[in-house]
Amino acid sequence: MIYDRPYMKTSPVNGFQNRSMVMQLLIINIAVFVVQNVFGVLFNQFSIVGQYFALSGAHIIDGKLWTLLSYSFLHSAGYFHILGNMFGLYFIGRVIEPIIGPRPFLYLYLFSALIGAFFYLSLNYDTMGLLVGASASVSGLLAFFCLLKPEDRITLLVFFIIPVSIKPKWLLRFYLIITLFSILTAELQGTTNIAHSAHLGGLLTGFLYYQFFYKKEFAPFSAFKEPSIELPSWLKKQNKTQAKVSYKVNYSKSHSELKEEVNKILDKINDSGFESLNDDEKTILHKARSSFKK
């Protein structure tokens, strides 16, 4: 099973890094929110952190390019803002991270925030407001989840109270329509403080990641399902020529041992491609193909 492979598991490192990426991001967001509140108590100004880390066109002009990402770890003074985003991060993230792994999950999270920032600036570059919040990142996670599991019915708590059951594919369509409608009727009119354009950027990032990275990454392995292993055409041709090469392969391995070695080779292919295989590994794949067909 793909879940048994090393890249699907978190590495056993002590301390903070031993936690899942979802938990690490939760801790960072909550810690930053606490710092914001501490500054609010000490200096009677909650947004003092936002002066250096929130996103705005003025900050970009001033050279504060780090705000393109740092804004996503800040939240407004109200607790509902951070609660909504952290609930989304936790419940969606705990489904996605075991499937794609911690590092790709982090990339999806950060790139959703980055593309969301560009979308926001494209419509609000000259405004005086400051953008904060992880909504663009959570929107990217939501889009990826809905495309990954479109038919798995889920239950949402509207206003954290009313349970609503819906299929993810319809949730994504509804969210996209609401976002586009809100951009046209509210954000472009300057009548809202919600950055719907950033949400749209996150949604687009989730779609692009699913379409061009996730599906592309796992597509080559659709051929490596038991009970057979389909080898690339160039390896079949090489095998037909019966070239005389000295191999050091233990053909007495049990089925379970062989399967374990094949999984390691598949991991190597996943990281570096077929061209990274040596002759011994190609031979093991050929032996596994014959063995699984019996």
Image: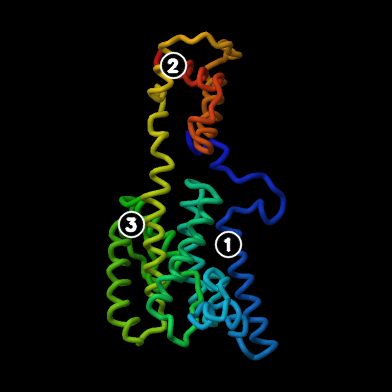
30, above or below 210, in the image: below
Badge number at residue 25: 1
Q: Nearer the viewer, residue 253 or 70?
A: 70
- Residue 3 higher or lower than 245, as above or below: below
Q: Secondary structure at mark 2?
A: helix
**Distance in Å between CA atoms under marks 3 and 2:** 46 Å
Tag 1 or tag 3, which sits nearer the N-term?
Answer: 1
41 in relation to 115, above or below: below
The answer to whether the residues at label 3 and label 2 have Cβ atoms under 8 Å apart is: no
Mark number displayed over residue 238 = 2
Q: Is residue 51 left or right of residue 240?
A: right
Of pointers 2 and 1, the one earlier in the residue sequence: 1
Q: Could you say which quadrant of the image residue 92 lies in? A: bottom left
237 left or right of 55 in image: left
Residue labelled with disc 3 = 168
Viewer-nearest residue: 71 or 127: 127
Q: CA distance from mark 3 to mark 1?
A: 24 Å
Give above or below for 171 relative to 192: above
Amino acid under label 3? Pro
Helix, strand or loop status at disc 1: helix
Rendering coords of residue 128 (x, y %): 47, 87
Res. 8 visible in picture: yes
- Left or right side of 234 for 72: right
Position of 148 with respect to 248 (left or right) is: left
- The 10 Å Cα crowd at callout 1, few under 14, some 14 to 19, many 20 or more, is some
Which residue is drawn at the image coordinates 66% and 83% (left, top)?
A: 39
